């Protein structure tokens, strides 16, 4: 299951910097013409061990993180800040403005 972040409590810059302290990060920048292709590449990358992804509202990037991390311990999230959903919902919620971000994990 994927965590779908619905709160605005965490600023995007702070979120990325916090995650980069614990993991290696790289991103895939997309535009209207290559989003579907890069989304497939993004999802393929998430099948690697200790890898998770981040997809945020209003940012044309898929973020890929490598490293062992417990998001519940590292991020100041409480019940109600997020819910769990499948991969399609994780993308849909962000694209439709229902969520600020989605953490995706295929493991």
Image (spheres, rainbow, N blue to C red):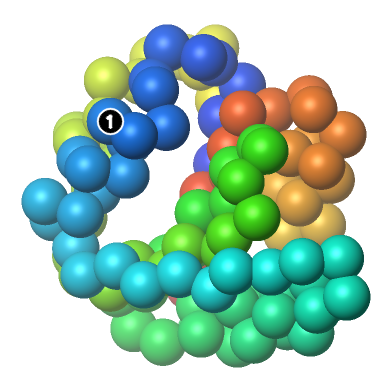
User: Viewed as shown, does residue 73 lie left or right of 80?
Assistant: left
Q: Is residue 98 above or below residue 39?
A: above
Q: Residue at x 20, y 54 (%)?
A: 20
Res 100 → quadrant: top right
Res 18 → quadrant: top left
Q: Residue at x 54, y 73 (%)?
A: 28
Q: Total marks drawn?
A: 1
Residue 84, percent from left and from top:
62, 38
Q: Residue at x 58, y 60 (%)?
A: 61
Q: Secondary structure at mark 1?
A: helix
Residue 22, percent from left and from top:
13, 55
Residue 11, percent from left and from top:
39, 22
Front-lying residue, 2 or 34: 34
Q: Evaluate whether residue 83 shows in this view.
A: no
Residue occupied by mark 1: 14
Res 17 → quadrant: top left
Q: Evaluate whether residue 99 shows in this view.
A: yes
Residue 57, percent from left and from top:
66, 37
Front-lying residue, 71 or 7: 7
Q: Residues within 10 Å of mark 1 (few under 14, many from 20)?
A: few
Q: Is residue 88 above or below residue 100?
A: below
Spot the residue most to the left: 21
Q: Is residue 101 above or below residue 62?
A: above
Q: Residue at x 78, y 25 (%)?
A: 98
Q: Is residue 51 above or below residue 56?
A: below
């Amino acid at each position: 299951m994927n965590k779908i972040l619905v709160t605005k409590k965490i600023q995007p810059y702070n979120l990325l910097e916090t995650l980069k302290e614990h993991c290696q990060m790289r991103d895939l920048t997309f535009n209207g013409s290559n989003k579907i292709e890069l989304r497939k590449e993004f999802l393929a990358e998430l099948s690697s061990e200790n890898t998770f992804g981040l997809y945020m509202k209003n940012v044309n990037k898929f973020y890929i993180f490598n490293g062992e991390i417990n998001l519940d311990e590292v991020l100041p999230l409480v019940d109600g800040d997020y819910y769990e959903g499948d991969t399609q919902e994780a993308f849909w919620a962000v694209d439709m403005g229902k969520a600020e971000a989605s953490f995706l994990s295929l493991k």
